[in-house]
Image (cartoon, rainbow, N blue to C red):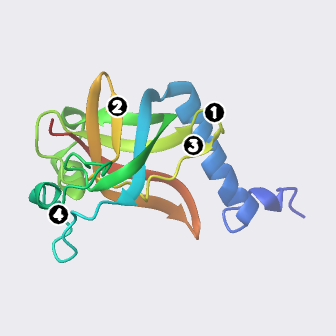
Amino acid sequence: MSTTDPSTCSGSTRGIMNHQAHFLNHVRNNGQSAVYTAITGDACPCVNSATGYCDQEWHFRNPAPGDEDCNGTGLIDTVTTNTNIKAFILPKADLNEIQRQKVGLRAEDDYLFVGALNVSAETLFDISGFNADHDYITFATHKYILRAIDAEKIGDIIVYYFAAMKKRAA
């Protein structure tokens, strides 16, 4: 008769959740700090529904008293939410060529982002809804966007997310 605890077997949900908890604990203790900034708001009427891009001329053609200008963001009445996170942020130079190609790391200042822990909630931080047009991550005083976001799963449980982290254009 085996004395192995079945809750730690990889086939059980509880065992799988332990993988996520183990990863988050490792990130908590060894990850790098960053800030995830999400900017949400109402769509500005200047956004061209066919292209999804802003038409700044719209604001000149449609001046209205008190009408808010989106400044090219496509959003008005914006709300900015900053979340302190921790993740493993690995420089391109630390990865082999196959790893670089898998997530599309090309520029010298690209990073591999693996994580993340929501510092205040002590939970896995979901980056799957990252919007590269508005959201960004601040790391080491620079702003970055995430590309090629994917998740490492065991069954249906997400253990961690990973993505290419590329410096944001000014």
Point 15% across, 35% down: residue: 170
Cα–Cα gap, marks 1 and 4: 35 Å
Q: Relative to 23, is 75 on the left or the right?
A: left
Tell me the mark number nearer the camera, choosing from 4 and 3: 4
Q: Disc 3 marks which residue?
A: 23
Cα–Cα gap, marks 1 and 3: 17 Å
Q: Disc 2 marks which residue?
A: 138
Cα–Cα gap, marks 1 and 2: 17 Å
First in sequence, mark 3 or 2: give its number: 3
Q: Residues within 10 Å of mark 3 (few under 14, many from 20)?
A: some
First in sequence, mark 1 or 2: give its number: 1
Q: What amino acid type should be assigned to the residue bearing mark 2?
A: Thr
Q: Say which mark, if any, is on residue 120.
A: 1
Question: Which element carries disc 2, helix, strand or loop?
Answer: strand
Q: Are marks 3 and 2 in contact (CB under 8 Å)?
A: no
Q: What amino acid type should be assigned to the residue bearing mark 4?
A: Tyr
Cα–Cα gap, marks 4 and 2: 25 Å
- Along the viewing direction, whichever of 52 and 124 lies nearer the viewer: 52
